[in-house]
Amino acid sequence: MTMYSNWAPISLNDALSRALRIVVLGVVLGVATSAQAQFRVEVSGVGLTQLPIAVAAFRGDDAAPQKIAAIVRADLERSGQFRSIDTAGSVIDEIARPDPSIWRQKGADSLVTGSVTRLADGRYDVRYRLWDVVKAQGQDLGAQSFPVPAGDLRLAAHRISDIIYEKLTGEKGVFSTRITYVTKTARGYNLWVADADGENAQAALTSLQPIISPAWSPKGDQLAYVSFESRKPVVYTQDLESMKRRLIANFRGSNSAPTWSPDGRMLAVTLSRDGGSQLYTIDANGGEPRRLLQSTGIDTEPVFSPDGKNIYFVSDRGGAPQIYRTTSTGGAVERVTFTGGYNISPAISPDGRWLAYISRINGAFKLHVMELASGTASAITDTTDDESPSFAPNGRLIVYATQQQGKEALMTTTLDGKIKARLGGQGGDIREPDWGPFQKP
């Protein structure tokens, strides 16, 4: 994120100040309800079309390290596409045939049942079944079994949520995808990789110096980020399986704001090696960067369009930060944002239809969403310090950072802003989330 009170060239001191400064928004719309941090999703707005679904407690859930039914329920609520129906403590496994009339009376269209059984080898067999209870006799919409080690119980729950979401909406679910974010505590800085609900966070990097601008590779196997461990901003990539790092950009001056091309072959970065902060592309394995534009202003925060043909970026070439667009090889520049005098942090939806960004309105930093074809934009939060939007890989949700009354959190929101949820995650100052791609089965 590049949020400055005055838009000025990024010196080392400026960049360090940026990295040490946590500017995040604050509306806490969900709360943890157990050690596994399940969440209540607060819904606002009217005229929402949500599918009513009942997720009964799974047989054996109480003895399992993770509460599968609760995770599935929270996933579906957080998506904004489902409304949970009270199951009143019902425990139903995937073998029993439910009485659909009971669930229709409760207002449900669908019912999820299942079980969790510990196997002799120490693994757990997680099973579920989805029912359409609108039909008079109830219709079995399918079942599946996931034999997994205890450490993968949450992943099994997320995969069940994905299957249910796709079965009932026709679109892919994002519950088994991952996010990355950065925290700062008294002990230093951490780069985390977590489930899409913020839980199960694993540290990818720990440093006494700031870490900023994490970005997922298209395959979800690497992260690019900026580290200050050498007392200046330097761009690295890191393989998440081997944890091996590759130095990508360590040129004179500032090296910042990495973003991957859709094919994963190159990165767009902001470098000040030739004076001023300018856009370059560089091979994903490193090498000599190629300058994209000639500008007397600051060009930064690049992001590729999904087809790789264009790059959106922030520039003050018109006097104040606005979002512009150029081709991925440089060339003519087109201004994209016109509403508001200070617009930064662009993110493009996977279908290329929407632009999410941060706009400063009367001193408040607010998350906006624009339909690119029409140019129509609107604020989707009622808060004053929004940061770092990133789209889910199905384009249905946006993750961003938040703060309220000194309490930091990660949030997701639907594109209309009507349904928001607070995610789990590590403590400390939280910033710069990025949502990863779909995971391979």
Image (spheres, grey):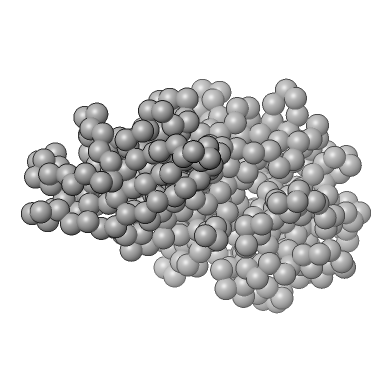
Q: Position of residue 91 (x, y in %)?
A: 26, 34
Q: Residue at x 62, y 75 (%)?
A: 309
Residue 209 visible in this rendered orientation of the protein? yes
Q: Quadrant of residue 12?
A: top right
Q: Is 136 in front, or is 325?
A: 136
Q: Which residue is drawn at 41% across and 60% down?
A: 172
Q: Residue furthest right?
A: 252
User: Looking at the image, is 133 positioned above or below residue 262?
Assistant: above
Q: Is residue 65 left or right of residue 178?
A: left
Q: Position of residue 345 (x, y in %)?
A: 60, 52
Q: In this view, does 328 lie to the left or right of 26?
A: right
Q: Which residue is drawn at 32% across and 54% down?
A: 143
Q: Is 1 in front, or is 213?
A: 213
Q: Is 134 in front, or is 431?
A: 134
Q: Is 66 in front, or is 116?
A: 116
Residue 340 visible in this rendered orientation of the protein? no
Q: Is residue 88 left or right of residue 166?
A: left
Q: Position of residue 196 (x, y in %)?
A: 51, 45
